[in-house]
Image (spheres, helix red, strand yellow):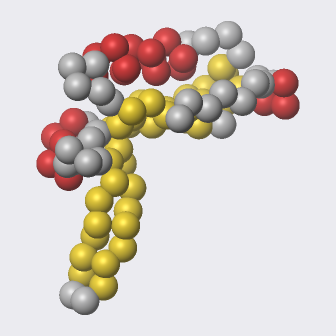
């Protein structure tokens, strides 16, 4: 199961704090992240591909981010009982 949360202007620390709380929630037995991610176009010669760039620190992720595709964060969690977990989606 993966949990993601996007950044909002002026809301970066609060969003990260929510993910860090989730990583310690009851039923979570392991996690990786949160990692900064952004979406970008990768061009090599005449080829272009849309990619999700995942970083390990803020600098490189921020250099790829744009207003249209700001830095977001990705947290992967391992659940003790995944079959009984509720699915929650925010749009």
Q: Residue furthest right?
A: 83
Q: Position of residue 20 (x, y in %)?
A: 45, 17
Query: Which residue lies most toward the front here?
Result: 91
Q: Could you say which is closer to the camera, residue 6 or residue 85?
A: 6
Relative placement, left or right, of 18 versus 40 is right
Counting labels gives 0
Can residue 12 be seen at all in this image of the molecule? yes
Q: Residue furthest bottom?
A: 46
**Rendered residue at 39%/55% (across/down):** 52
Quarter of the image holding residue 44?
A: bottom left
The image quadrant where one finds the N terminus is top right
Residue 45, how many percent across, how many down?
A: 21, 87
- The residue located at (36%, 21%) in the rendering is 16
**Which is more toward the observer, 11 or 51?**
11
| Residue 60 visible in image | no
Q: Position of residue 53 (x, y in %)?
A: 34, 54
Counting from the top left corner in percent of width and height, residue 32 is at 50, 33
Quadrant assignment, res 40:
bottom left
Image height of 46 relative to 63, above or below: below
For residue 24, side relative to residue 5 (left or right)? right
Of residue 47 and residue 81, the one placed in the foreground of this image is: 47
Q: Say which residue appears at 35% left-offset and 44% top-offset.
A: 37
Residue positioned 25% across, 37% down in the render: 57
Query: Which image quadrant is residue 73 in?
Result: top left
Relative vertical location of residue 73 with respect to residue 27 in this rendering, above or below: below
């Amino acid at each position: 199961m993966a949990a993601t949360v996007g950044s909002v202007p002026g809301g970066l620390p609060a969003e990260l704090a929510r993910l860090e709380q989730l990583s310690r929630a009851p039923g979570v037995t392991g996690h990786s992240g949160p990692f900064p991610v952004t979406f970008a176009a990768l061009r090599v010669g005449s080829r272009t591909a849309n990619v999700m760039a995942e970083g390990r620190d803020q600098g490189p992720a921020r250099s790829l981010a744009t207003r249209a595709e700001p830095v977001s964060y990705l947290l992967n969690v391992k659940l003790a009982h995944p079959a009984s977990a509720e699915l929650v989606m925010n749009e």
